[in-house]
Amino acid sequence: MLLIPCPWCGPRAQTEFHYGGDASLRRPALSTARTPADPALVDYVYLRDNPKGLHQEHWQHAAGCGQWLVVARDTRSHAILGSAPPGGDPLSPPGTDDPAA
Amino acid sequence: MQLFSALAVLREGLTGQTGWRRHWRKATPKPRYDTVIVGGGGHGLATAYYLAKRHGITDVAVLERGWIGGGNTGRNTTIVRSNYRVGANPPFYEHALKLWEGLSRELNFNVMFSQRGVLNLAHSPGQLDGYAERGNAMRLHGIDAELLDRDGVAERAPMLDFGRDARFPIEGGLLQPRAGTARHDAVAWGYARAADALGVDIVEDCAVTGLSIDRGRIRGVDTTRGLIAADKVGVAVAGHSSQVMTMAGIRLPIESHVLQAFVTEGLKPMLDTVVTFGAGHFYISQSDKGGLVFGGDLDGYNSYASRGNLPLASDVAGNAMAMMPCVGRLKVLRSWGGVMDMTMDGSPIIAKTPVTGLYLNGGWCYGGFKATPGSGWTFAHTIAQDAPHSLNAAFNLERFATGHLIDERGAGPVPGHQ
Ligand SMILES: Cc1cc2nc3c(=O)[nH]c(=O)nc-3n(C[C@H](O)[C@H](O)[C@H](O)COP(=O)(O)OP(=O)(O)OC[C@H]3O[C@@H](n4cnc5c(N)ncnc54)[C@H](O)[C@@H]3O)c2cc1C
Ligand SMILES: [Zn+2]
């Protein structure tokens, strides 16, 4: 069982969360050219770094506070290294990203 | 190659089993080969075998990081079927199934292919209609399919819960009689032995750490046992496809996820077919040793850990209890996980890459064991001819940009999140 630290609710069981995948992806600005396949959009939708090691990923505390969060996790060991609100840095020392502060 | 036969077994029985030899050489890598295959799973070994057998290309090495059969080849639940419906899938998987039907003879190695049938349960009239449509599509491709009503299912698998108060009452099912199971290790060993006999070097304990590329052309591979030059390199490393292709600067439409499997204590024969649950994700068969072999969903997050977590185990157990409550008192003896290369449309890639002479076979998701012979057969063709066979032309890398996805599940670009 993964114990995921929700920045709002504290450590909670993985079963309360919904996985949202790679958090490093940034949706490109929609191109105005009406090309059938905008390469930047194809990359965004389909291609992944798929790292073996540190992975920054989205989870939603679906059965809790409902918020989305970013989790840093090692894909080799499943060890969770930190979490933060969306857009935050899950690897910064605990407290510095405290949404309540 | 020392051939297996009834006579050989008898002779060895009378002489204390002292005459058996190693089934393939422990090769030391040469400095160069015509073709190098990265990954000694079923797919890599089958590719090497068909390169030698069908295309006369025998200056081939298979480089395996660990040992033969230590990857997903030796971790899967061994279901072999061709009950597909979309695009290039039915002809490709049916070609593989036909190869399975002759494989033990072809390799002179008993892969224990058992055509015990695969039965997909339907739990609502709508789902049964969907299966009728799938069955019809299969039959139009010349693939066997039979639609069963509730009594037909009860006749084949009486141990399921047929109560009207079952959590998901059974309405009927779709049966593919020619589908079944095979002995996974034997498939790897059989291909390794047959490829070796044709001159292929099988090099274990040799991890590829880099791809050497010069002006858009492959020149060879860097390995933990030194540089190996090659005109052509075929990559078949299953869950590690992204890891190896990134050495060529190629990003893939793949996420690696963990899939678990479970085996119970041995039982007297009780289940002589493969059954899949239609109201969740669960499938089960009984091995020749008597253990029930089963599995379900991915754990659901990116993973290279080769082991899963408890929530999924409990989900799988819940599915089992809903479908066949009679298993409730059994003990699970073992569980394990394998790293799956999940593509964004659920279909594989057997294709050329932007690098000349570099070929990719991957993205098998949780269904690549059944494909093993067909995958090796078409990948060998693609490498030998530098062009895909018509059976695998659609399994290319460009389809994600051109929109020609092969999305059997109709789920969109979300591997593992249902
Ligand atoms: C639990 C589970 C159940 C499954 N059930 C089924 C099923 O019922 N039916 C079905 O059809 N499919 C099933 N599958 C899927 C199937 O097992 C895989 O799709 C298939 O085995 C993958 O191809 P392979 O056999 O070549 O992979 P593997 O046996 O994993 O071979 C790949 C090899 O590449 C090697 N490798 C990786 N990186 C390197 C490197 N850098 N250098 C050298 N070598 C490297 C690995 O060590 C490995 O041995 C299941 C998988 C799992 C995990
Ligand atoms: Zn929360």
Image (cartoon, rainbow, N blue to C red):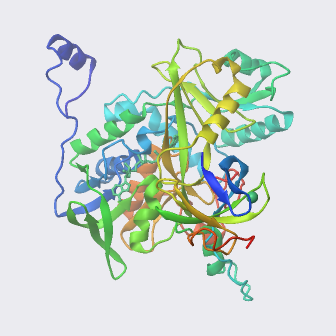
| Residue at position x 24%, y 61% in the image | B224
| Residue at position x 65%, y 74% in the image | A88
- Residue B51 image position (x, y, % from top left): 32, 52
Total number of numbered labels? Answer: 0
Residue B329 in which image quadrant: top right
| Residue at position x 46%, y 31% in the image | B182
Q: Is residue B69 visible?
A: yes
A18 sits left or right of B68 in the view:
right
Decide which of A60, B366 is in the foreground and name it. A60
Examine the rendered structure and indicate whether residue B164 appears above or below residue B31: above
Indicate the quadrant of ligand 2 in the picture. bottom right
Decide which of A73, B40 is in the foreground and name it. A73
Q: Quadrant of the N terminus of chain B?
A: top left
Examine the rendered structure and indicate whether residue B70 appears above or below residue B268: below
The residue lying furthest to the bottom in this view is A32
B330 sits left or right of B362 in the view:
right
Residue B174 in which image quadrant: top right
- Residue B184 image position (x, y, % from top left): 42, 35
| Residue at position x 63%, y 80% in the image | A40
Q: Is residue B57 visible?
A: no
- Residue B315 image position (x, y, % from top left): 67, 37
Decide which of B147, B263 is in the foreground and name it. B263
- Residue B9 image position (x, y, % from top left): 24, 17
Examine the rendered structure and indicate whether residue A64 appears above or below residue B118: below
B23 sits left or right of B273 in the view:
left
